[in-house]
Image: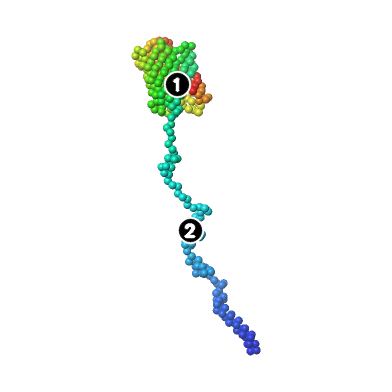
Amino acid sequence: MIDSPKHPALLALVAVVAAGGAQAAETMDHEAMGHGQMNHGSMDHNQMNHGQTDHGSMDHSQMNHGGMEHGQKAQPAGYGSRTPIPVPSDADRAAAFPELPPHTMHAGGINSFFLLDQLEYQDADNASVLSWDASGWVGSDINRLWFRSEGERANGRTEEAEVQALYGRAISPWWDLVAGVRQDFKPGSPQTWAAFGVQGMALYGFEAEATAFLGENGQSALRLEGDYDILLTNKLILQPTAEVNLHGRNDHERGVGSGLANTEVGLRLRYEIVREFAPYIGVTWNRNYGNTADFASEEGEDNNEARFVAGIRIWF
């Protein structure tokens, strides 16, 4: 300690330093703070004032981070609500779907169709047979003139031949009523019949014909025919066919008896080289019944016969 009275200025400086040190000690006694013994786990950060910001008292749910609330996903730039699409009005529907003019097939013109369904060689027991079955029409969608022809030749002679000319009128998209005449050339002497019936397409593409005939001297007959195309491929088609003939009276000259006269069932497999032309092979079974069978036996003919067939089918 300097206590010499000879140095008054030095004494004054010491007094000032001593006073400052005492004030600093009063302000913060680091020894008393005990930094080495501080318990950070007991520090209450909620009570700490970091630059006058009380984080413990902050309400984050009220904070607006750039206009985005908590729980709301950030949207891409330029995103926003669009103007809702208005409900279509009757005028809008009328403009989008205008009424179409009535549909008319072929525009009311005259058209035609011809089908040579069967032109075939048949290997019969007693002879080689050339058989045909053709049909066609000319006219409009509603009114048509139909013709049909079928028959067969054996050993260079015509055994059976007939031609029908019919007026047909459509009664539905799939069915026609027909009426007209049928002319038989063989067997026996020529004979004329009145014909009327119905023809068309039943369910699943089954084509059917039912025709009744009224002939000379009170003769009557009924013919039922049907066929169906089974597509094995786009070009290979299997066609089963069936025909049933019934007669009202015996006609010995033409070899037919009353009741169920005969039936024919066939199965033909054709290959369409083009849609309009198709060769085929197949087999048919022919059978006579009742008096018709008796008349055939008198002539030495078979009443139950299977035939191999090969031919062509053409349409245009």
Is 67 rendered above or below residue 215?
Answer: below
Residue receiving disc 2: 69
Please tell me the numbered disc located at residue 22.
none
Local SS, label 2: loop
Report the residue that reaches farthest toward the bottom.
5
One can see residue 103 in this view: yes
Question: Left or right: 110 with respect to 7?
Answer: left
Q: Position of residue 279 (x, y in %)?
A: 51, 21
Residue receiving disc 1: 136
Q: Quadrant of residue 23?
A: bottom right
Q: Nearer the viewer, residue 68 or 145?
A: 145
Q: Nearer the viewer, residue 259 or 277?
A: 277
Q: Position of residue 307 (x, y in %)?
A: 47, 17
Q: Residue at x 38, y 11 (%)?
A: 252
Q: Quadrant of residue 160?
A: top left
Q: How is the image coloured?
A: rainbow
Q: Nearer the viewer, residue 175 or 260?
A: 175
Amino acid type at circle 2 is: Glu
Q: Position of residue 166 (x, y in %)?
A: 40, 20
Is 255 rendered above or below residue 144?
Answer: above
Crowd around label 1: few <14 · some 14–19 · many ≥20 (10 Å): some
Mark positioned earlier in the residue sequence (2 or 1): 2
Question: Left or right: 235 with respect to 215?
Answer: right
Report the residue that reaches farthest toward the right.
6
Is 220 rendered above or below residue 108?
Answer: above
Q: Are marks 2 and 1 in contact (CB under 8 Å)?
A: no
Q: Residue at x 52, y 25 (%)?
A: 274
Q: Position of residue 114 (x, y in %)?
A: 47, 21
Local SS, label 1: strand
Crowd around label 2: few <14 · some 14–19 · many ≥20 (10 Å): some
Q: Residue at x 43, y 16 (%)?
A: 163
Q: Residue at x 39, y 18 (%)?
A: 180
